[in-house]
Image: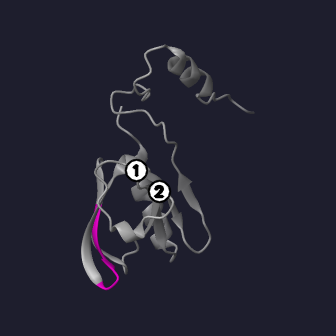
């Protein structure tokens, strides 16, 4: 199954913009494929303003978020792998959505890393949320 992250990022971004607020992305700076100015990285994370007045050519697809923005007066292309996005939120009130770090990959299997002991699998089963009908 496809990841829901890019669809949710697009929807929350649109909701924030339609509400007249400023959308921001919280991004993990440790993710391979991230292309942002080094000066914007703080504590292993990057906060990016993606409002229509701050960026040009914003594209949020199933694998990447790309746009052109100005950093210190210099225009620069930015590339963010969609899995590096930790949250999308409105700057003014903090409303938005955070994403789990261990989201399922495209084939529907949880990403368990290189743990061959089976303990990671047991932990993943225990940590998955359980839904129940509330009447």
Q: Residue at x 32, y 64 (%)?
A: 36
Residue at image x 54%, y 52%?
98
Q: Where is residue 53 in the image (x, y as percent from the top left)?
A: 37, 81
What colour scheme governs how the chains and residues are painted in the rendered image of this protein? one colour
Asked if labels 1 and 2 touch by Cβ distance under 8 angstroms, the answer is yes
**Marked residue nearer the N-terminal end (2 or 1):** 1
Determine the residue positioned at 39% across, 57% down.
10
Residue 54 position, x and y percent, is 37, 79
- The boundaries of the magenta stretch are 66-73
Residue 46 colored magenta?
Answer: no
- Cα separation between marks 2 and 1: 6 Å
Asked whether the viewer can see residue 49, the reply is: no
Crowd tier of the residue under label 2, counting other residues whose Cα lies within 10 Å: few below 14, some 14–19, many 20 or above? few
Tell me: residue 68, above or below residue 130: below
Say which element carries label 2: loop
SS state under label 1: loop
Left or right: 35 in relation to 8: left
Number of other residues with Cα within 10 Å of mark 1, as a class: few under 14, some 14 to 19, many 20 or more: few
Check residue 30 in the rendering and tell me which mark sits there, or answer none. Answer: 1
Q: Mark 2 points at which residue?
A: 44
Q: Is residue 78 left or right of residue 21?
A: left
């Amino acid at each position: 199954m496809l990841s829901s992250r890019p669809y949710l990022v697009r929807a929350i971004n649109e909701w924030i913009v339609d509400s007249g607020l400023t959308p921001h992305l919280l991004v993990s700076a440790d993710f391979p494929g991230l292309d942002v100015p080094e000066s914007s990285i703080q504590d292993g994370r990057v906060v990016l303003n993606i409002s229509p007045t701050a960026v040009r050519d914003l594209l949020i697809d199933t694998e990447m978020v790309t746009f052109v923005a100005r950093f210190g007066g210099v225009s620069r292309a930015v590339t963010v792998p969609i899995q590096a996005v930790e949250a999308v939120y409105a700057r003014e009130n903090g409303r938005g959505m955070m994403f789990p770090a261990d989201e399922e990959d495209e084939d529907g299997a949880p990403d368990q890393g290189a743990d061959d002991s089976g303990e990671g699998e047991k932990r993943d089963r225990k940590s998955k949320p359980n839904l129940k009908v509330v009447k």
